[in-house]
Amino acid sequence: MARLQPYGDVFRCLMGDGKADTLGSMPRAMRVEYPGAIYHVMDRGDRREDIFVNDVDRQDLLKTLAEACQKTAWQVHAYCLMRNHFHLVVETPDANLVEGMRWLLSAYTIRLNHRQKLFGHVFSGRYKALIVEGSGSGYLKTACDYVHLNPVRAHLLGTDERLLAYPWSSFGWYLAAPEHRPGWVRVDRLLGEHGIQQDSPAGRQEFERHMEARRLEEADEEEIKALRRGWCLGSEPFRQKMLELMEGKLGENHSGELHRETAEQKANRIICEELSRLGWQESDLTARRRSDPGKVAIAARLRQETTLPIKWIAARVQIGTAKGAKAVLYHLARGQHQRKPARVDEPCAQLEFQSTV
């Protein structure tokens, strides 16, 4: 096998440029995935067109992101929604970036097209995913600060407006008290890289001061170039480790079956847990009627905690057709939502953040 080179060949292998590389013809670029990996993800609208029609669409993408985090155990360190693209700094404890992004982008596209009576692609090509070193050496801070300062670079904020005034980024959550913050937004690591040890009113106030000072600094062009065009943001030892990981992955099957297998393993674990809770055997899924509340509850949990399609869930739990199962789960979720009070961690960018500082 040819030795990977640090820049040109690996850049094409990771990010993809539509050309064959020196390692053989690869129709699709390969993603590096491992437990605990952190990525700066960016995706644009098809032909650079808008991906949001209105604020309802922006809220829906955040809602869909929250669902993706619940399904994949992702931890979001930063996000920012712009007019025709979005940024996301996400940590993947279970090595499932591809699985989660596939679900996130397809789910949002379906929902947007249905709501706006549109059709076709929303996003262009493949999303970019820059691997970020998260060892506390400042690279996570670089990526997250870049994301939070996007509205400043795009001139969406006046010079007298605080960063908090832009409602479609995670910056406001960093200034919110923990009890008002969604569970999928993780703030401790970025606060730590800013030298802030406690998620307290004083710590949050200090974080805002740091960021307001950063917006006044002259942009580091090399840093921005690395974030926009690079494949890895980290130290030389970290980059070398990623290159070695790439070499080990080249001989594996990257058609997507590995990711689907992982999702199915998770689903079967959930089913075993639910069968044990109910005191059932596997055969009960066949013997009991399709509308059995226990079977519906299993299907609802699979729908909530995995990225598997409804067709797979309906067949595995034996609750009828995909269309029928989708209708049952929709009405179940709707009934539960009507009975529950509003949650403080609902991802709504229109929330008026209480800074408590």
Image (spheres, rainbow, N blue to C red):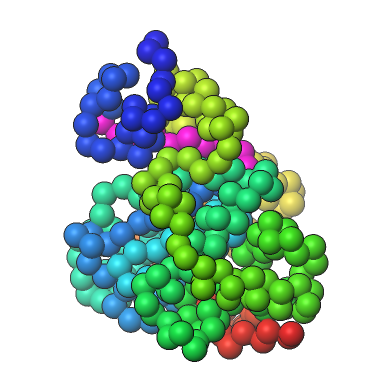
User: Where does residue 340 sit, x and y in percent of width and height?
Assistant: 64, 81
Residue sticking out furthest to the top: 1
**Residue drawn at the location 62% of the way across and 64% of the way down:** 185
User: In the image shown, does 231 or 117 lie closer to the viewer?
Assistant: 231
Observer-nearest of 127 and 117: 127
Q: Is residue 48 above or below residue 7?
A: below
342 on left or right of 327: right
Q: Is residue 56 left or right of residue 270?
A: left
Q: Is residue 201 above or below residue 18?
A: below
**Number of callouts:** 0
Q: Nearer the viewer, residue 282 or 195?
A: 195
Q: Is residue 195 left or right of residue 95?
A: right
Displayed quadrant of residue 17: top left
Residue 95 position within the rendered picture, expressed as x and y whole percent measured from the top left: 56, 40
The residues colored magenta run: 27-36
Quadrant where the C terminus sits is: bottom right
Q: Main secondary structure of the magenta part?
A: loop
What's the residue at 51%, 72% (across, down)?
215
User: Is residue 211 shown in magenta?
Assistant: no
- Left or right of 330? Residue 235 is right
In percent of width and height, residue 10 lies at: 38, 29
Furthest residue in direction front, as rendered: 218
Q: Is residue 4 above or below residue 302?
A: above
Is residue 336 in view? no
Q: Residue at x 47, y 65 (%)?
A: 218
| Residue nearest the viewer, comparing 251 with 14 | 14
Q: Is residue 196 visible?
A: yes
> For the point 60% across and 56% down, which residue is it?
141
